[in-house]
Image (cartoon, coloured by chain):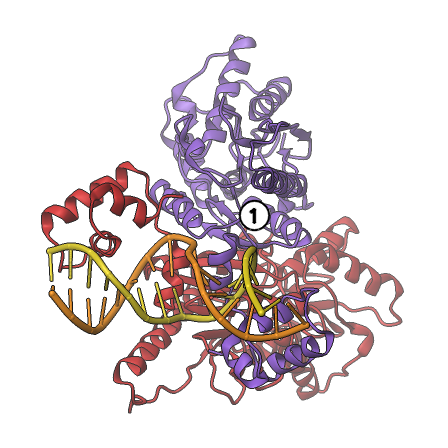
Chain colours: A red, B purple, C yellow, D orange
Amino acid sequence: MITIKDIAKKAGVSYATVSRALNNKTDVNEATKKRIVKLAAQMGYRPNVIAQSLVTQKTNNIALIVPDVSNPFFAELSRAVSEAALEAGYLLTICNTGWDAEQEHEMLEHMQSMQVSGIIIKPSVFYEPKTFDLIKLPLVVFWHPYENETDFIEMDHSAGGKIATEHLIERGYQRIAYIGGEATSPANQLRILAYQQALQEHNMKVNQDLISFGGFDLQSGYDRIQKMLTQSPIKPDAVFCGNDYLALGVLQYLHENNIRVPEEFGVIGYDDIYFSSLPMIQLTTIAQPRKKMGEESVKLILEQIQQLENKQEFEEQSKVERKPARILLKPELKIRATT
Amino acid sequence: MITIKDIAKKAGVSYATVSRALNNKTDVNEATKKRIVKLAAQMGYRPNVIAQSLVTQKTNNIALIVPDVSNPFFAELSRAVSEAALEAGYLLTICNTGWDAEQEHEMLEHMQSMQVSGIIIKPSVFYEPKTFDLIKLPLVVFWHPYENETDFIEMDHSAGGKIATEHLIERGYQRIAYIGGEATSPANQLRILAYQQALQEHNMKVNQDLISFGGFDLQSGYDRIQKMLTQSPIKPDAVFCGNDYLALGVLQYLHENNIRVPEEFGVIGYDDIYFSSLPMIQLTTIAQPRKKMGEESVKLILEQIQQLENKQEFEEQSKVERKPARILLKPELKIRATT
DNA sequence: CTGAAAGCGCTAACAC
DNA sequence: GTGTTAGCGCTTTCAG
């Protein structure tokens, strides 16, 4: 590894000068600056960002922690965040937790230890209210707000759950099931709550046999609708799925078993991933705006970084204390062919 | 930030002892070790991995560089690599280049500067043969082998392109088009070459109007088949798509315009993303085994790390010089409903 | 404008 | 067992 000392030796200057030249500081002779920059390029010098970070106490990385990058919703979100981060001059590190709470926690800790400039996280489990307060770095959580000091961005899942359920009720379905993610998933819990409330408001029974928790993947949707339709004491005639992925699994099963959609059976999803809009799928669903989520999240991180810098500059605590952001994005019903 | 010095002060020991205790070294008194570990936990100590990396000259990170994480194929690949890396005790950092060569190059450089333990890259452009030789870290490239010192894993795209094209020929299609990714995409080039060769071997004309380059996304497939069918002097009756994403766009257009598949028009994709197997899609395609790619890539990185360590240990260059791996995975034709 | 030197937080000899 | 000390590669005062 070539260091600035190597360059210094060859250039016949002190390595402090090399550092200044390479960082394009003003207080260096233009001629020597050019000479050093050229020499560095020749020698194939690469700055050691580890060492840089250690002294400057900052990195140029933002971390994104998601449950499953192969899930189209998270995949699209990841891309949106990545683009927004790059735009702002930060490199995005994407971490995949595999819906594993322990893993997630460890990654959160590890990213802190890695001194990233900020962390954006889509939690896979419910946290204790104060958990995130322990994190000293700029942080944005994709989740419904708790009363703490953390920035939040979230879809209004309560509204989304209500809209979806009421849509099925309006369409005349009688026994509406809910096939969601893991029981511990926060977004999932809010939606199922809204689902139950909507049913009750319309004087319909909430039946535990029609509520199912499990993986958020396609196969899981397939398996669970199969189980519900073949083994449950009460058979649903419609299902509200916790995400589009699950809904696609459900559609696959219905298709294979010649159950006509939407005549015999209604299906609504959640997320509006790109595939749902395909003509051969045409899934009715609740849209979540990934791009906006990506942009907003990075914007909030930048704000926090900015504030942190101000605080350091003035020594004293800045007068204008920033209030944690509470961004609640509105879901949108996309009526297509499955209801 | 709490450092080992803070702990040392409170515990009344030197900070070297704290370091030893926290790293669970054997040469520390069991009692003090326990005391220190407990104290560290109480004080909310987090090791600064930046500092650790600086002195140990290694991180526990593997970097994965892909063109587009929102593309299902790369999304699934990312997940596979992530899981394999985690299994091996490494954290995976996923970087999204957005098919931007400059961006990609910068990320490659940056990851080197970040001293990651290894880099796994799916290049979005053709590199000069020796480009990768400049990288001193463990490296695995998802790409067809060049004659250099780098580990490669790749699908046999030549075989894949041949299989796909011949399948369409066998089905009796006469004017087979190719709708691929960017002209600079390596995998794309190999497939198009195979496509052209296959046509010639079967005494069919290669027509430039039936060959199209562009983005690897769904909308691009839609737009390009539209253009081909409405503006090209010669109209295709089948198309071999550079990936499933493009094929889905093509199917969407055909569907909207009531062109019957496979009777009037044949479509074959490439990758076999999960969605292609859905009953409402049933896309004929060439499968690439993501899981295997993920596992193999991490395995090769580990091998290289191992070798690097041995080399250092023995000072002398290890006698058993490791040969660069050349893994060529076999593609598999999945015949479904679109051909 | 440039050099000397301190030190970021930590690990790893080397003494005792 | 434990303390002392020398760096890892770099930025940044502080002198000159």
A8 or A94: nearer the viewer: A8
Q: Residue at x 61, y 29 (%)?
A: B322
Q: Is residue A175 left or right of residue B157?
A: right
Q: Residue at x 75, y 53 (%)?
A: A253
- Residue A76 percent location from the top left of the image: 50, 57
Write down the chain letter for disc 1: B
Q: Quadrant of residue B163?
A: top right
Name above or below for residue A2 compared with residue A16. above
Q: Is residue A136 visible?
A: yes
Q: Is residue A202 left or right of residue B239?
A: right
A192 or A122: nearer the viewer: A122
- Residue B235 percent location from the top left of the image: 44, 24
Name above or below for residue B105 compared with residue A321. above
For badge 1, the amino acid type reads: Pro
- Residue B47 percent location from the top left of the image: 54, 70
Q: Residues within 10 Å of mark 1 (few under 14, many from 20)?
A: many
The residue identified by callout 1 is B72
- Residue B294 percent location from the top left of the image: 63, 43
Q: Quadrant of residue B326?
A: top right
Q: Residue furthest bottom?
A: A319
Q: Quadrant of residue A53?
A: bottom left
